[in-house]
Image: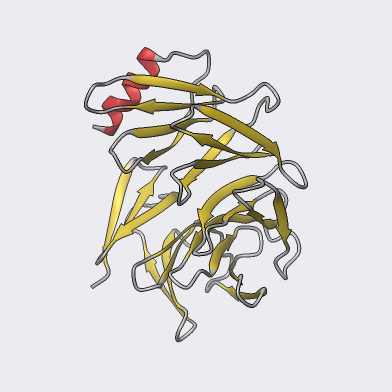
Amino acid sequence: MIELLLSLVLAVAPAPISEPYQLVVEPQGTLLVADGGSGRIVRVDPRTEAVRVFPLPGSAPDANLNTAVFDRRGVLWFTGQGGFYGRLDPHAGRVEAFPAPRGFGPYGITVGRDGLVYYASLAGSYLGRVDPRTAKATVLQPPTRGQGARRAWADSRGRIWISEWNAGKLGRYDPATRRWREWKLPGASPMPYAIYVDDRDIVWLSDFGANALVRFDPRTQRFRTIRLPSRDAAVRQLLGRPGQLWGAESAVDRIVVVRTR
């Protein structure tokens, strides 16, 4: 079904270069596709197959759209590795893009319990905090310089977890105390990429260095490594539901499922 919808996007809303990066689902079931190649967000209604295109403003050339998330008001916030973050109000049809602090790098994005938007900057090596009212971004600096913050995810307590690609660490920022913690992943050369916090606040990461999924329990502060059956699987995205963890193995065109209960 997803492949069919992406084909529909490319057929109905063609572009010279189209590179769909992420797909998110609105509460009513419509789909929003972040198309990094063409610099636009495409909305698809699976019931009617209607397609609507939201191009980024001219002030954000070569934004290189990456990931997106909905805030509490139903506004879609997105990142662009070219040095931008922005928002789309699907109801008003208005797209805005804002230059990111330190330029290139905005990557993973999440919404915290406080309603603020947080994004990880890979090239900038920081966690950005965005106030949805003003759209202003504030730099939150992890303890390790040049750590390469790649993905971000909020837990039920409002803490923000990040994967630190360059440093091989798991990072955590607590907005309540404004304090950071970091933990080195096990193994000789860990390279944490995707991150996901499940319904029990267990943190999961994909480790390109070990070709594995890594489980971290914040209560015991212990890691557990689960080797992937496919060689060099390159899991770039993690999601889940109660009792299950799902990973997208981008290098081998497979989905991996871990039963967590």
Q: In the picture provided, is 217 more to the left or to the right than 98?
A: left
Residue 191, located in which quarter of the rendered image?
bottom right
In the depicted structure, whether residue 117 falls above or below residue 253: below
Residue 175, located in which quarter of the rendered image?
bottom right
Q: In the picture provided, is 177 more to the left or to the right than 153?
A: right
Q: Is residue 245 visible?
A: no
Front-lying residue, 167 or 70: 70
In the depicted structure, whether residue 18 falls above or below residue 258: above
In the depicted structure, whether residue 99 falls above or below residue 52: below
Q: Position of residue 163 (x, y in %)?
A: 56, 61
Q: Position of residue 3 (x, y in %)?
A: 29, 29
Front-lying residue, 125 or 93: 93
Q: Residue at x 30, y 53 (%)?
A: 256
Image quadrant holding the N terminus, namely: top left
Q: Is residue 38 visible?
A: yes
Q: Residue at x 40, y 33 (%)?
A: 32
Front-lying residue, 249 or 70: 70
Q: Position of residue 46 (x, y in %)?
A: 25, 28
Image quadrant holding the C terminus, namely: bottom left
Q: Residue at x 54, y 39 (%)?
A: 66
In the depicted structure, whether residue 37 falls above or below residue 237: above
Colouring scheme, one of rainbow, by chain, secondary structure, one colour:
secondary structure
Q: Position of residue 64 (x, y in %)?
A: 60, 32
Q: In the picture provided, is 60 more to the left or to the right than 48?
A: right
